Image (cartoon, grey):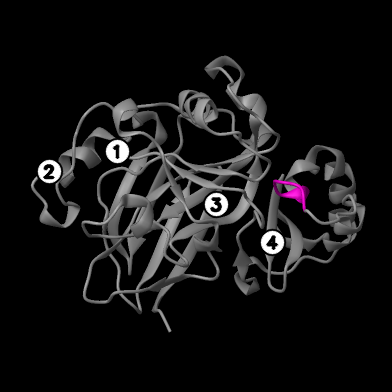
Amino acid sequence: MKICRYDDNRIGVVRADGVHDVTAILEDLPAIRYPSPLGDQLVANLDRLRPKMESLADKAKPKAIAGVKFLSPVANPTKVIGTPTNYRAHIEETKGDPDFGNRRYGPLHEAGLFLKANSSLVGMGEGVAVRFLDRRTDHEAELGIVFGRKCTDTTPEKAFDCVAGYSMALDMVVRGSEDRSFRKSIDTYSVLGPWLVTKDEIKNPDDLEFWLTVNGEARQKSNTKLMIMDCANQIAWASKFYTLWPGDILMTGTPEGVGRVRPGDVMHFEMQGIGAIDIPVRAHG
């Protein structure tokens, strides 16, 4: 099942013939009073709501995918987690490049994970608003994992029990000497979508082809099987430090080919088993 949030916060099921409106499913979410519970409530209740969502989709007239503005399929994550330097070829391309600063190149476990501000999260239809035009803003294409239930201190063997599904993710970054999380938490610099693909549709997230072009120019092309740390071990590692809540997002690292984008550019991103989308780039403000 492919689930999206689109236009004016409508909920859709994506099928080959388009987007089917199932917004009425929100009426079945639990009533919420202050303080709001942690996690995204639609994702938390997805298993229970899925049969009714399929039924609603059967009755809804499809809307063309090209005519939809895709928001992030997750509205309320408690955190966006990033995995740094998870492809060897990307590590090599950063060495000697002054825009990447004075990096350490020790084992991934020594580098640690990092967090991106929730406020930086947008959908692929919303695009990226580049700030600091005198500095370099780069695209980093990656697989995004969306968690479906509360999970802490899990093992690699049980890691996928926590997963709701997968999305395409862009971990945008402005280059510089400041802390990584600071430079990656700019508004619109965490891009997710265009929809959430439930985990039953992705047999092996550790073997997905993906590629990104900018204005038709090939930039990044790789496969998740080339990750240094696979998905299960990333999930288990993250859960040792954080409680993972429904809707939380793990961006699993980017391969070689990262490069600068400027206002007016269009990034085209495709990932096997998930989909394809064009993401516009504009100037902030």
Residue sitting at the far left = 96
**Sequence-wise first label, 4 or 1:** 4
Mark 3 or 1, closer to the camera: 1
**Residue named by callout 2:** 95
**Mark 1 → mark 2, Cα distance in angstroms:** 12 Å
Q: Amino acid at mark 3?
A: Gly
Is label 3 in contact with label 1 (beta carbons under 8 Å)?
A: no
Q: Position of residue 235 (x, y in %)?
A: 52, 29
The x, y position of residue 163, in whole percent, is: 64, 33
For label 1, the crowd category at 10 Å Cα-Cα, with few meaning under 14, some 14 to 19 and many 20 or more, is: many
Task: Point out residue 208 in the picture as x, y percentages from the top left corner.
Answer: 46, 36
Label 2 to label 4: alpha-carbon separation: 39 Å
Foreground of the two, 216 or 137 = 137
- The type of residue carrying mark 4 is Arg
| First in residue order: circle 3 vs circle 1 | 1
Residue at the bottom extreme? 285
In what quadrant of the picture does the C terminus appear?
Answer: bottom left
Check residue 5 in the rendering and tell me which mark sits there, or answer none: 4
Q: Secondary structure at mark 3?
A: strand
Q: Residues within 10 Å of mark 3 (few under 14, many from 20)?
A: some
Q: Which residues are magenta?
A: 36-42
Image-based side of 145 in relation to 29, left or right = left
Q: CA separation, marks 3 and 1?
A: 25 Å
The spot of residue 131 in percent (x, y) is 34, 74
Labels 1 and 2: the sequence-earlier one: 1
Identify the residue at image location x=64%, y=74%: 67
